[in-house]
């Protein structure tokens, strides 16, 4: 009787696994709530990611290779200026951008993260630039032929961004810029640097200058030796008396820089969360496949309730992140008054939870999860920084609580 | 360009009682993507002036037309049928629909995929050619259009190698794997595709005899592979 009872339990758990096979296609929630165009974008991005990014991502991480060729291909498909207005860019919505980035980051979150940073910079020029600046900078940046980097953080000012010290002094029709910026993604490779500088006192004394790479006095530090994001160079930028023409003052008016930087970051937070999301969903998919194959104690480890419950929890973390990100993206598209705290909430929730999902996926892979033969450890190394940059998750909580208690 | 909305090539199909679940993901037949790309290459070379994507299917098949238009087709024709009508379609009737459409479309080249990955019949291009009494270049791995645009040269993959045929237009070309690599649809083109016209026609109103000529007697899974055995020697 005891043997029969045990057999019943074993076959019941295997039935759960077998039924899951048939339903797998619908389990990801990636398609729900999306309209026809969004689904078409999702397919296009998925095809590109599987063909152009996935086969090479591990190599790029290992060799610290910045894949400018692939960025150009991405730009040709319209991925370089997704929410830039359609006279120059693709003219799509933040939600559509998130759908695209989620598919790209399944293949490589680090490569996708740079594409999102570039998109953010193009959007800033598109939104705050004069018509002349838009026409000058956007045509070859939305194609990703020329890349843009976002320069706000300094060695002495991270979370306290408004305390930045890089100074720009007006001399005739030029600005003389001196200071340094730290942790700049793409530094040394990008053609244009969107730099927040001090032209006056306080928050209202910050302006935004677009500085070209070959400017005299602009130099780049060593490529930082990082835990992840290895396919992107990250360097300190030093500006020593760099002369920047007044035509490169974004928007043509001083004192707007902080507002521009923060507006850029609202979208940037949705983007970075999306990079975490795509990788987490992929890690979950890999964990599901692995636990069905790996047998211990006479059966696949997916037959054990602990594994099943773990996978269920991971799926809920991914799905909750996805819903928060997509709603925040829609709020941004609609210019909802709550867009900033919604983006901040999505950011700290998604980057934390998706990191946990990838960590748990690695655990479910056992010893193999620790090997570079499987992409899970790379996703973990890449995702760790998403909890820190574009505003630490602690700063995100400051933003949310401020709006709750206002 | 004839495009078929088939079960996505990534899906692991489950067959129950001889039927496949209808709600699985569908997308454009991969060989039809190659056909669309072949047409686009001619358009970009200035040889072809207009590309019309055609599908025969249920309402959702329009997704494949949008894909074709996102790749660059100028407009589409959607022959719509109820699910039951579509399920009962045989290749001869599909070919008859294309033949009927020729009266209106007057195409110079009919591009199609060599076969659809759901039924793998590989009938329709050949049947269209026979019904319209026009030449066919099937399993195309290479294509050249004559300077005067009155004929084409099709290099075909055949069992013992390659064969090159020359034929006058209009003609049917069915596309094989090595003809080209289909382009990605760009995001702006996907957005533009929404505005391109789709001419909808009802399958039941096209005046085509849809009675089946084939009766399915039995549908069974192939016998599951039995393990091999070891023999003492091979004598």
Image (spheres, coloured by chain):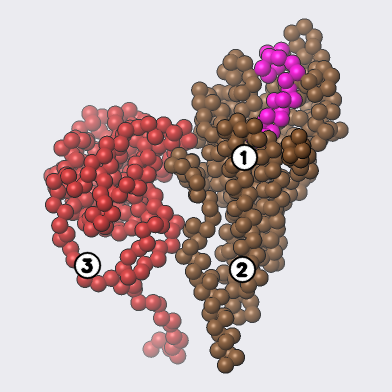
Q: Is residue B30 above or below residue A312?
A: above
State the residue in front, B178 or A5.
A5
Q: Secondary structure at mark 3?
A: loop
Where does the magenta region start and end?
A246-269
Residue situated in front as seen by the camera: A154 or A266: A266
Q: Colour of chain A?
A: brown
Which residue is located at x 31 percent, y 68 percent? B18
Judged from the image, the secondary structure of the residue bearing numbered disc 1 is helix
**Label 3 CA crowd tier, 10 Å (few <14, some 14–19, many 20+):** few
Residue A335 seen anywhere in this rendered image of the structure: yes
- Please check the rendered image and state whether residue B202 is part of the magenta-colored stretch, yes or no: no
Above/below status of B131 relative to A190: below
Q: Residues within 10 Å of mark 1 (few under 14, many from 20)?
A: many
Q: Which residue is mark 2?
A: A308
Tell me which residue sits at (32%, 70%) in the image. B17
| Mark 2 vs 3: CB contact within 8 A | no
For disc 1, the marked residue is A328
Asked if marks 2 and 1 touch (Cβ < 8 Å), the reply is no
> Is residue A154 shown left or right of residue B195?
right
**Quarter-of-image position of residue A138:** top right
* Residue designated by label 3: B216
Q: Quadrant of the N terminus of chain A?
A: bottom right
- Residue B172 versus residue B74: which sits nearer the camera? B74
**Colour-to-chain, red:** B
Sequence-wise, the earlier of marks 2 and 1 is 2
The residue sitting at 57% across, 70% down in the picture is A293
The lab-note entry on whether marks 2 and 1 share a chain reads yes
Chain containing the residue with disc 3: B
């Amino acid at each position: 009787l005891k043997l029969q009872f045990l057999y019943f339990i074993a076959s019941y758990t295997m039935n759960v696994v077998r039924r899951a096979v048939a339903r797998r296609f619908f389990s990801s929630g990636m398609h729900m709530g999306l309209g026809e165009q969004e689904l078409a974008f999702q397919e296009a991005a998925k095809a590109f990611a599987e063909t152009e990014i996935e086969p090479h991502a591990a190599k790029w991480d290992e060799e610290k290779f910045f894949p400018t060729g692939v960025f150009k291909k991405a730009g040709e498909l319209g991925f370089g200026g997704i929410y830039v207005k359609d006279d120059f860019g693709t003219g799509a919505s933040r939600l559509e951008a998130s759908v695209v980035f989620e598919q790209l980051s399944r293949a490589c979150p680090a490569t996708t993260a740079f594409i999102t940073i570039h998109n953010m910079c193009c959007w800033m020029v598109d939104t705050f630039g004069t018509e002349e600046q838009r026409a000058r900078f956007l045509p070859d940046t939305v194609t990703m032929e020329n890349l843009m980097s976002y320069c706000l953080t300094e060695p002495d000012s991270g979370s306290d961004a408004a305390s930045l010290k890089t100074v720009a002094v007006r001399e005739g029709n030029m600005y003389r810029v001196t200071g340094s910026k730290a942790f700049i993604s793409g530094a040394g490779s990008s053609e244009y640097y969107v730099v927040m500088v001090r032209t006056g006192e306080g928050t209202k004394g910050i302006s935004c200058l677009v500085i070209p790479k070959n400017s005299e006095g602009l130099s780049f530090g060593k490529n930082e030796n990082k835990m992840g994001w290895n396919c992107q160079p990250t360097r300190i930028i030093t500006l020593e008396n760099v002369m920047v023409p007044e035509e490169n003052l974004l928007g043509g008016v001083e004192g707007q820089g902080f507002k521009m930087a923060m507006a850029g970051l609202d979208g940037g937070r949705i983007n970075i969360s999306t990079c975490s999301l795509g990788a987490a969903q992929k890690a979950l998919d890999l964990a599901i496949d692995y636990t069905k194959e790996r047998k211990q104690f006479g059966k696949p480890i997916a037959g054990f309730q602990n594994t099943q419950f773990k996978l269920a929890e991971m799926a809920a973390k991914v799905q909750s992140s996805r819903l928060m990100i997509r709603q925040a993206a829609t709020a941004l598209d609609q210019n909802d008054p709550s867009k900033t705290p919604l983006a901040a909430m999505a950011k700290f929730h998604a980057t934390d939870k998706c990191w946990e999902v990838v960590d748990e996926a690695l655990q479910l892979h056992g010893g193999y999860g620790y090997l570079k033969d499987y992409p899970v450890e790379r996703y973990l190394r890449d995702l760790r920084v998403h909890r820190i940059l574009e505003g630490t998750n602690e700063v995100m909580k400051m933003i949310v609580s401020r709006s709750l208690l206002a | 360009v004839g495009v078929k909305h088939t079960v996505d090539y990534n899906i692991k199909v489950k067959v129950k009682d001889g039927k496949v679940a209808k709600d699985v993901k569908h997308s454009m037949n991969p060989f039809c993507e190659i056909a669309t790309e072949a047409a686009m290459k001619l358009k970009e070379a200035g040889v072809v002036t207009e590309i019309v994507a055609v599908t025969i299917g249920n309402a959702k098949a329009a997704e494949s037309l949008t894909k074709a238009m996102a790749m660059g087709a100028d407009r589409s024709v959607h022959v719509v049928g109820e699910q039951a009508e579509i399920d009962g379609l045989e290749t001869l009737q599909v070919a008859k629909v294309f033949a009927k459409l020729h009266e209106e479309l007057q195409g110079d080249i009919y591009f199609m995929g060599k076969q659809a990955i759901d039924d793998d019949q590989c009938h329709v291009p050949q049947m269209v050619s026979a019904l319209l009494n026009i030449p066919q270049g099937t399993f195309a791995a290479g294509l050249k259009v004559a300077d005067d645009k009155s004929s084409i040269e099709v290099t075909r993959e055949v069992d013992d190698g390659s064969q090159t045929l020359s034929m006058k237009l209009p003609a049917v070309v069915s596309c094989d794997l090595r003809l080209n690599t289909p382009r990605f649809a760009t995001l702006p083109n996907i957005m533009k595709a929404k505005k391109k016209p789709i001419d909808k026609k009802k399958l039941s109103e096209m005046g085509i005899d849809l009675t089946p000529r084939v009766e399915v007697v039995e549908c069974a899974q192939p016998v599951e592979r039995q393990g091999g055995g070891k023999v003492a020697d091979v004598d």
